[in-house]
């Protein structure tokens, strides 16, 4: 059984090596602990080791952990599917949302963001492999949605997110990430100023960093197996 410290060291070494190979600075790759199905105590342990950003998939589960960890100064990312009856809680209790894939949700998050808070940081989720019934919008619709979302006052569009199909081969892993990066570059060439590529999980973070990931969402490699 590995300790949290050992797992974190492994992940950090992997980030450093991948960043170096890509000619990037490791600091430009933000590590988000994907903490779904992990207890608050496991998040606290990683927080004590210096990880401050965590991603949750389920609102109720996240709010409970946020309450348990209220003494810590953490940054919370919502990375799960968004039901429209949950947008008010998401707008109030998160700093980032990575999984926006329709204008209706973006509008609600913008309207419901408490006025005293800074605009909510958003990424648009792209269904990069065009998988049926998978979350995320088609790549073809990104331009239109990105420009619409960038007009909303309560949110700040930061970039794109994707969860590609699992692949074993490193070259295969890189292809969808390269497509997402190209999509971000196209949006920026058309007047947006997006700085975030949220891509890469435990099994493909190396490929994602090589293709320019600025945020990686790491669950099992950081926490060990999920308790559910
Ligand atoms: C669970 C999850 C992750 C992390 O997955 P691992 O393979 O455990 O690293 C990342 N992103 C999202 C959206 C997830 O739901």
Image (tube, rainbow, N blue to C red):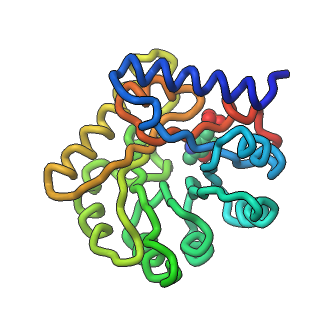
Looking at the image, residue 129 lies above or below residue 173: below
Q: Position of residue 169 (x, y in %)?
A: 46, 15
> Is residue 123 left or right of 8 when viewed as pictured?
left
Residue at 58% in and 69% down:
90
Quadrant containing ligand 1 reads top right
Residue 4 visible, this orientation: yes
Q: Quadrant of residue 171?
A: top left
> Is residue 4 left or right of 97 when viewed as pictured?
right
Q: How many marks?
A: 0
88 or 22: which is nearer to us? 22
Q: Position of residue 122 (x, y in %)?
A: 43, 61
> Is residue 58 left or right of 117 when viewed as pictured?
right
Residue at 39% in and 56% down:
124
Residue at 27% in and 56% down:
141
In the orientation shown, which residue stands out farthest toward the left? 190
Quadrant for the N terminus, please: top right
Residue 61 visible, this orientation: no
Residue at 43% in and 72% down:
119
Q: Position of residue 213 (x, y in %)?
A: 41, 36
Quadrant for the C terminus, please: top right
Q: Position of residue 219 (x, y in %)?
A: 66, 38
Q: Quadrant of residue 10?
A: top right
Looking at the image, residue 129 lies above or below residue 53: above
Looking at the image, residue 14 lies above or below residue 181: above
> Is residue 97 left or right of 1 when viewed as pictured?
left
């Amino acid at each position: 059984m590995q300790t949290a410290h050992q797992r974190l060291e492994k992940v950090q070494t992997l980030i450093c090596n991948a960043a170096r190979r890509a000619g990037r600075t490791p600091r430009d790759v933000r590590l988000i602990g994907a903490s779904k199905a992990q207890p608050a105590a496991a998040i606290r342990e990683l927080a004590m080791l210096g990880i401050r950003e965590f991603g949750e998939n389920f609102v109720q589960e996240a709010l409970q952990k946020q309450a348990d960890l209220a003494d810590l100064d953490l940054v919370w990312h919502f990375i799960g599917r968004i039901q429209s009856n949950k947008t008010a809680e998401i707008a109030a209790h998160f700093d980032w949302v990575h999984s926006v894939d329709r204008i209706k949700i973006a509008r609600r998050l913008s309207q419901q963001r408490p006025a005293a808070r800074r605009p909510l940081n958003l990424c648009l989720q792209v269904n990069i492999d065009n998988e049926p019934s998978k979350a995320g919008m088609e790549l073809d619709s990104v331009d239109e949605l990105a420009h619409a979302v960038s007009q909303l006052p309560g949110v700040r569009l930061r970039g794109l997110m994707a969860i590609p199909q699992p692949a074993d081969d490193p070259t295969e892993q890189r292809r969808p990430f390269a497509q997402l990066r190209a999509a971000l570059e196209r949006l920026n060439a058309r007047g947006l100023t997006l700085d975030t590529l949220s891509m890469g999980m435990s099994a493909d973070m190396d490929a994602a960093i090589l293709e320019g990931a600025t945020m990686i969402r790491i669950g099992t490699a950081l926490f060990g197996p999920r308790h559910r």
